[in-house]
């Protein structure tokens, strides 16, 4: 590529590590130190204030919208043109590492710092963003901030969400001081680019440097409430039981069997990640179970079929186990295909830097998929070590893997921010 500008890999690593120190916790399962910055927690507030101060130090103009999405703008030579936007999220699952989301946000900062260092002006403004509550672990809806900013979810619906302790989203947003004034509906940027760790094993196993993300698979989340009858474990004859735990187990096993059934394609994924029995004691038949269902498929039709079949199966289990099963949809997104031009620019950037790349479909949800509904959007994936483990303190991409992705992003941003 004509320009031979590179980002500062050490500075990128330092900024990831510094952010990764906010919200550290000791993980009992691994003995490692991980990151816990649940959306709108005090730790999220501290992380946000830290990133905002870095944005200001880089000379950017910071805007916060009514759902707490934060945007920081570097002016273009033509300020009236729609900006080139980069971003991701800094909230985390409760058992996180320091890369998920943060790499995208720190990439955006690093690209801007590189433009600053090299006195490079761009025709269009460049905006870096971090979106509120991408993970959905606390309030139940993933990509919430970007979905509200792009109009898929109404602001009032987001404000009305509650966490497990009954705390309201809106109150928690106010509490950390991030309920901004800016209108929540985002003016479509010129294009949007997000750098992210792959969060899976594919790139590393194939010895690839860069994933050119072609799209994101469809994702459906449900919360099930299974109501049985709590009773004594020793004295209640088996035929008199209404065991909500057994009902949850049957559903979980059926989900596994469905992933092995070609009727749902070859890439159906299903997880019952939370199973909360009540009262949850050794000698009491669970009277109630709250359980979650996470089903995903790159093909929308396969996912729809799986959802319908699962719902029918709930009735079957309810009859068989003499329990009542109710469910509610907590999140649902169709599959998304990223913009061809953005994908081509990512490929081109990788090739010109002698990096090996391939197209890949994202198994995880991302803010970029919401942005794809209002502008041309795309993503750059970088490989992860240890089978690309993620949502875990072992999550790790090397400084070189990260820098490769951010250098490619720099090329893409330079191309798109200079488009008339
Ligand atoms: C987001 O991390 C997801 O669950 O895909
Ligand atoms: Mn993420
Ligand atoms: Mn995540």
Image (tube, grey):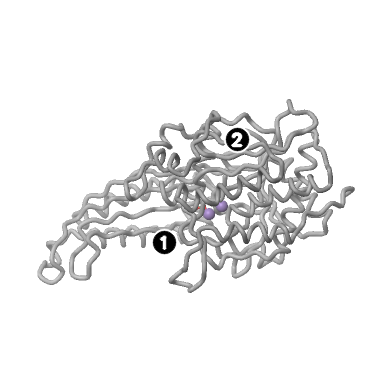
User: Which residue in the rendered view is the most extreme toward the top?
Assistant: 80
Find disc 2 in the rendering and name its residue. 63
Closer to the camera in the image, 173 or 258 = 173
* Residue 150 position (above or below residue 201): above
User: Which residue in the rendered view is the most extreme toward the right?
Assistant: 2
**Nearer-N-terminus badge (2/1):** 2
State which quarter of the image contains the C terminus.
Answer: top right
Q: Distance of mark 2 from mark 1, alpha carbons? A: 45 Å
Q: Secondary structure at mark 1?
A: helix
The residue sitting at 67% across, 36% down in the picture is 61
* In-image side of 203 versus 70 (left or right): right
Badge 2: how crowded within 10 Å, few (<14), some, or many (20+)?
some
Residue 56, x across and y down, in percent: 66, 43
Residue 21, x across and y down, in percent: 56, 61
Closer to the camera in the image, 364 or 64 = 64
The residue sitting at 76% across, 48% down in the picture is 410
- How many numbered discs, if any? 2
User: Which residue in the rendered view is the most extreme toward the bottom?
Assistant: 31
Q: Nearer the viewer, mark 2 or mark 1?
A: 2
The residue sitting at 59% across, 68% down in the picture is 387
Find disc 1 in the rendering and name its residue. 256
* In-image side of 296 versus 198 (left or right): left
Residue 49, x across and y down, in percent: 56, 47
Closer to the camera in the image, 374 or 6 = 6
* In-image side of 75 versus 221 (left or right): right
Residue 390, x across and y down, in percent: 55, 62
Badge 1: how crowded within 10 Å, few (<14), some, or many (20+)?
some
In the rendered structure, are the residues bearing label 2 and label 1 in contact, judged by CB atoms less than 8 Å apart? no
Q: Quadrant of residue 250?
A: bottom left
* In-image side of 354 versus 109 (left or right): right
């Amino acid at each position: 590529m004509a320009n031979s500008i590179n980002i500062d890999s050490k500075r990128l690593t330092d900024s990831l590590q510094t952010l990764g120190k906010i919200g550290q916790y000791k993980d009992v399962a691994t003995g490692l130190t991980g990151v816990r910055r649940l959306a709108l927690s005090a730790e999220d507030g501290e992380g946000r204030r830290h990133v905002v101060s870095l944005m200001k130090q880089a000379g950017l103009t910071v805007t916060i919208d009514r759902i707490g999405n934060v945007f920081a703008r570097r002016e273009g030579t033509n300020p009236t043109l729609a900006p080139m936007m980069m971003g991701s999220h800094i909230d985390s699952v409760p058992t996180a590492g320091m890369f998920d989301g943060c790499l995208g946000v720190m990439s955006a900062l690093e690209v801007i710092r590189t433009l600053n260092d090299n006195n490079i002006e761009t025709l269009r403004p460049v905006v870096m963003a971090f979106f509120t509550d991408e993970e959905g672990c606390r309030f139940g809806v993933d990509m919430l901030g970007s979905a509200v900013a792009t109009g898929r979810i109404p602001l009032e619906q987001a404000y009305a969400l509650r966490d497990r302790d009954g705390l309201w989203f809106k109150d928690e947003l106010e509490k950390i001081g991030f309920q901004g004034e800016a209108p929540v509906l985002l003016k479509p940027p010129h294009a949007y680019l997000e750098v992210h760790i792959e969060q899976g094993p594919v790139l590393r196993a194939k010895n690839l440097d860069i994933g050119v993300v072609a799209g994101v698979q469809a994702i459906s989340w449900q919360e099930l409430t299974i109501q049985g009858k709590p009773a004594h474990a020793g004295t209640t004859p088996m035929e008199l039981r209404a065991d909500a735990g057994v009902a949850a187990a049957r559903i979980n096993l059926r989900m596994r069997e469905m992933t092995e059934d070609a009727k749902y394609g070859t890439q159906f994924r299903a997880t019952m990640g939370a199973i909360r029995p009540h009262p949850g004691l050794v000698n009491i038949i669970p009277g109630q179970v709250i359980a979650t269902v996470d089903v995903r498929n790159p093909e929308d039709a396969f996912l729809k079929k799986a959802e319908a079949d699962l719902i029918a199966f709930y009735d079957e289990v309810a009859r068989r186990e003499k329990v009542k099963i109710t469910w509610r949809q907590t999140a649902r997104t169709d599959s998304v295909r990223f913009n061809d031009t953005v994908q081509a620019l990512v490929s081109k950037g990788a090739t010109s830097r002698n990096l090996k790349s391939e197209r890949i479909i994202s198994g995880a949800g991302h803010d970029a998929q919401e942005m794809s509904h209002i502008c041309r959007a795309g993503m750059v994936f970088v490989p992860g070590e240890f089978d690309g483990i993620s949502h875990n303190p072992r999550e790790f991409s090397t400084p070189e893997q990260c820098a490769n992705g951010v250098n490619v992003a720099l090329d893409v941003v330079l191309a798109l921010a200079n488009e008339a």
